Image (spheres, grey):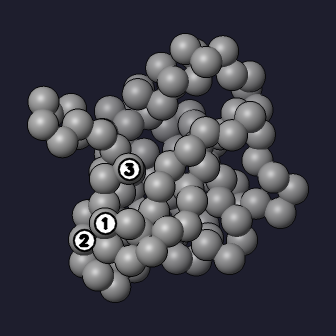
Amino acid sequence: MMIFLTDRAAEKIRGLFERHQLSDEACLRVLRGGCGCAGYSLGVAPAPDANDEVCESNGIRIACDRELAAKVDGTEIDFDGKLLGKGFVIHNPHDPCGCECRA
């Protein structure tokens, strides 16, 4: 599994890790959701679970459960800093709904 973080997304995530004083074991967690705009969400974990798939992008470890790994392989996570709609944007090439979800 490989998930890609843009420079903007990695910078925001590093800031979150620092603000919450998370250790080097911390990771960004991709969570399963429904279809379309409820598709995936992001969380922070103190460390990956034992049965997680883990990759690293832009210096950030990213984890998800093994069942989800194939569905998010090739996904890009960006950060949109516009005044309206600010947040992380998940571009998943496997999304059957064709929506770019904001997390």
Rendered-image quadrant of the N terminus = bottom right
Label 3 sits on a secondary structure element that is: loop
Does 90 appear above or below 88? below
Which residue in the protein does label 3 denote? 103
Q: What residue type is labelled 2?
A: Cys
Q: How crowded is mark 3: few (under 14 residues within 10 Å), some or many (20 or more)?
A: some
Q: Residue at x 77, y 40 (%)?
A: 47
Q: How crowded is mark 2: few (under 14 residues within 10 Å), some or many (20 or more)?
A: some
Residue 11 visible (yes or no) = yes
Which residue in the protein does label 1 denote? 37
Foreground residue, 3 or 63? 63
Q: Residue at x 69, y 22 (%)?
A: 22
Q: Which residue is drawn at 41% across and 26% down?
A: 11
Q: Quote the CA–CA distance across marks 2 and 3.
A: 12 Å
Residue 93 visible (yes or no) = no
Point out residue 99 in the picture as x, y percentages from the top left corner: 25, 71
Q: Residues within 10 Å of mark 1 (few under 14, many from 20)?
A: some
Asked whether disc 1 touches disc 2, contact meaning CB atoms under 8 Å apart, the reply is yes
